[in-house]
Amino acid sequence: MNAVFKGIVVVGLILYPFFVGYALAHGQYIWVSAVLIGLGVLRLFSKGNALLWPLTGFAILCGGLSLILKDHAWLKLYPVFMSIGAFIIFAGTLIKPPSMIERFARLAEPDLPPEGVAWTRQVTKVWCGFFCMNAAIALITVFFTPMKIWVLYNGFLSYVLMGLLMLGEFVLRKRQQRLHQMQE
């Protein structure tokens, strides 16, 4: 059942910008606030990784403030807080290793060589920069763009940029591994 809860939360959060866009276009933000709080609570009780707690807390905070203050802007701010939360998580692993990307890399390659550890640390720094940039762009879309642009960026373009960064990192990592193997 835990996997079902996690799946619901992931799908809900991925589709979140579209829910918000639809709800705000129809003057209904209260149910989206409740759904965001519900997704946060589901994540909280799914006993997932403690590293994700900042994201859980931000979901409950944004949904709760939206309801309490009767202000839908908090719903639009959630993607900003998601990027800030991701930055906190990734930066925290630079302070307390292993870095986030090293953790991911070790899933596929448990015996990561020292060069790989150094590489993954640098890539984690790149991700930190990405999350800062993404938070800034998401914040701009909240206050300075029409709803359609907010939905387009936060519901599509930011995911495309993340995918491109993942793909680029994967290609460069494989290239680095080949170069390192050739030097041995």
Image (cartoon, rainbow, N blue to C red):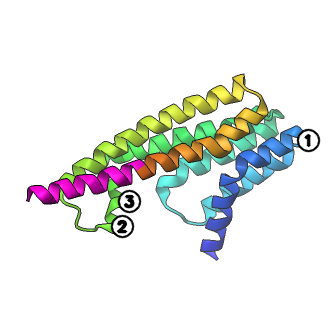
- Left/right placement of residue 146 relative to residue 140 reads right
Tell me: residue 177, above or below residue 81: below
**Residue placed at 61% from the left, 36% from the top?**
80
By secondary structure, the bulk of the magenta-drawn segment is best described as helix
Instruction: Give the structural element (helix, strand or loop) at label 1.
Output: loop
Instruction: Give the structural element (helix, strand or loop) at label 3.
Output: helix
Tell me which amino acid carries mark 3: Phe
Q: Are marks 3 and 1 in contact (CB under 8 Å)?
A: no
- Left/right placement of residue 86 relative to residue 147 reads left
**Residue placed at 67% from the left, 60% from the top?**
11
How crowded pointer 1 is (Cα within 10 Å; few <14, some 14-19, many 20+) is rated as few
Q: Is 176 covered by the magenta stretch?
A: yes
Instruction: Give the structural element (helix, strand or loop) at label 2.
Output: helix
The residue carrying mark 3 is: 104
Q: Are marks 2 and 3 in contact (CB under 8 Å)?
A: yes
**Residue sitting farthest toward the right:** 26
Tell me which amino acid carries mark 2: Leu
In the depicted view, which residue is nearer to us: 104 or 77?
104
Of the numbered discs 1 and 2, the one sitting upstream in the chain is 1
Give the numbered dot on residue 26.
1
Looking at the rendering, the stretch of residues picked out in magenta corresponds to: 168-184
**Residue sitting farthest toward the top:** 144
Q: Horizontal and vertical percent for residue 152?
A: 70, 39
Give the numbered dot on residue 107.
2
Tell me which amino acid carries mark 1: His
